[in-house]
Image (cartoon, helix red, strand yellow):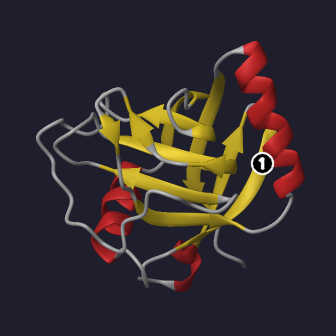
Amino acid sequence: MSPNLHTLTVKIGAESFTARLRPDLAPRSCERLLGLLPYSGKVIHGRWSGEALWSPLAAVMPQDVILPRENPRNHAAPGEILLYAGEVSEPELLIVYGASRFACKAGPLEGNPVLVIEDRLERLAQLGREVLWGGAMELHIESQPSPR
């Protein structure tokens, strides 16, 4: 994986965040995520997961794709982005902005950690609350351009 692929831009609404790819924790899941780029979708509030946003991936990832468990977690720290592609729920990204316990209507889930936003976490939390009270926002994830 080339060095410029280790940093991605995550844009939620009009706000852009720099996110670090986590191939050290979830190499196959990171490869799958990179294969979806550039990704455009929506984020809505993760109603079963606490302070988190989620983006359903069914439009870009077939439901029958099952990723192996790679350091999966149910609890994630603010800024962590988990990728879930398992048998219990549809494929999805979970973007954690506060206290969270990953779940769906069928019960607890565990996602593989693919990205982490390490700065401006306070602004990420504000956006999470805006989505909670105001509704869906656009989500774009793309590779950052290579430095010239």
Give me the residue at 31% from left, 59% from top. 32
Image location of residue 3, percent across then percent down: 55, 84
Residue at figure coordinates x 15%, y 47% from the top left: 65
The type of residue carrying mark 1 is Ser
Q: Position of residue 146 (x, y in %)?
A: 64, 73
Q: With 118 as the anchor, is 2 left or right in this view? A: left
In the shown orientation, is residue 45 left or right of residue 134?
left
Q: Is residue 14 visible?
A: no
**Which quadrant is the N terminus positioned in?**
bottom left
Residue 41 place in picture, x, y as percent: 51, 30
Split into 4 quadrants, where in the image is the C terminus?
bottom right
Answer left or right for 123 relative to 75.
right
Along the line of sight, which residue is nearer the eye, 5 or 17?
Answer: 17
Q: Pinpoint residue 135: horizontal percent, then vertical percent.
A: 68, 15
Near-viewer residue (119 or 78): 78
Q: Which residue is mark 1?
A: 16
Query: In the displayed structure, would residue 95 be above or below residue 53?
Result: below
